[in-house]
Image: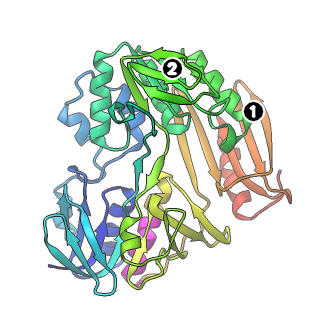
Amino acid sequence: MHAELLVIGGGPAALAAATAYRDHRGGGAVLLVSNDDVPPYLRPPLSKDFLRGPDDPDDPEDADGLLLTPAMTYPEQGITLRLGQTVTDLDARGRTATLSTGDRVTYGDCVLATGSSPRRLDVPGAADALVLRTLADAVALRSAATAARSAVVVGTGFIGCEAAASLRARGLAVTLVGRERFPQQTRLGPEVGARVAGWLEADGVVLRGEADVAAVEHGVRLADGTAIGADLVLLASGVEPQATLAAVAGAEVVDGRVAVDAQLRASVPHLFAAGDVAFAHNAAAGRRLAVEHWGEAETMGAIAGTVAAGGDAAWDAVPGFWSEIGDRTLKYAAWGDGFAHVRVVDHGGGAFTAWYADDAGRTVGVLTHDADEDYERGATLVAEAAPLP
């Protein structure tokens, strides 16, 4: 089998690459190989609306509503889906991929959009805990939540905070456990972390900060010996980029991600990488960035597909995302690789803006709650490396 464009992955970057290739008059066959059993779907709702949704976790209409595009549109676009399959070997020199079925595919160009997998704690019982990455994970979590009265969520990143708030909204007693004193303290600063902690506590979530999990057993046991009982345990302790195929193909891999330029090209010809798995050069930042945001995955995938079709595109946007924690929304735009100073400005009524700067006083990030003008203005200031306002 031959594909002019082979896309490996089933998330937003993969779909964006395939459709952008077609939109820019890429000719020939397009093959998308995904280890998921479902065509590309929305993942942000999995920790929010979907988790808070109907008590029937197997409602097919509920799941179908997450599809990014109806399944019947793929043949119309000339995109062939191979679902529930993986690529086991990638020969970049011969431009050949071997599928888990044993089929061999030759290609013109290949986009790696393999994403990330949930990171499990290296403690006893962790293999029995739930994770949240795929639709199947979300269905299992929602099913467990329907029968549960209590939950422990391990990890105070955005997925952990969102899921904790959603489980609490379902009526479960929820404890959120993390290593930092406040959620997202290192990434967003202690003052913002304290505000997020306040939101969660106001919703009834119990926080256990500065805590390490020693075991998962009928809940969790902390390193200090404290036992927190629960009917279900959700691990939201980060992700691991899936860059194995890139390494097999001989592409440069840096800190577990595929090093690519601003056009998303890897170090070997005819190979691109987009989304979580990419360590991509951002033309505006002037350096490579590791980004795990949904919107950036779509943007990167579209760039890779456009360039593969012979078009002109480069990644130069400021990464950003929204996070819904209960009924509150955070909007964040930043380079995401650190800051030296943060200044938080209150606007009244709970609204605020956090401005982030480097050592030279240049704006490197902005985070807002109910302050959309600052969010939009902040992204521009970050892109221009303007002084902190």
Q: Categorize mark 1 by other alpha carbons within 10 Å: few (<14), some (14-19), many (20+).
A: some
Residue furthest out toward the right: 360
Q: Decide which of 17, 130 is in the foreground and name it.
A: 130
Q: Position of residue 269 (x, y in %)?
A: 41, 85
Q: Residue at x 40, y 71 (%)?
A: 246
Q: Quadrant of residue 10?
A: bottom left
Q: Position of residue 295 (x, y in %)?
A: 48, 54
Say left or right for 288 vs 59.
Answer: right
Residue 175 circle label: 2
Element at label 1 = helix
Q: Is residue 20 visible?
A: no
Give me the C-alpha separation between circle 1 and circle 2. Answer: 21 Å
Say left or right for 100 vs 303.
Answer: left
Q: Quadrant of the N terminus?
A: bottom left
Q: Position of residue 134 (x, y in %)?
A: 32, 44
Main SS, magenta region, reads helix
Q: Decide which of 162, 244 is in the foreground and name it.
A: 244
Residue 102 to residue 160: above or below = below
Residue range of the region highlighted in magenta in the rendering: 300-310
Closer mark to the observer between disc 1 and disc 2: 2
Amino acid type, mark 2:
Thr
Q: Which residue is mark 1?
A: 191
Q: Residue at x 74, y 58 (%)?
A: 381
Q: Residue at x 39, y 61 (%)?
A: 13
Magenta segment: does it hold 306? yes
Magenta segment: does it hold 269? no
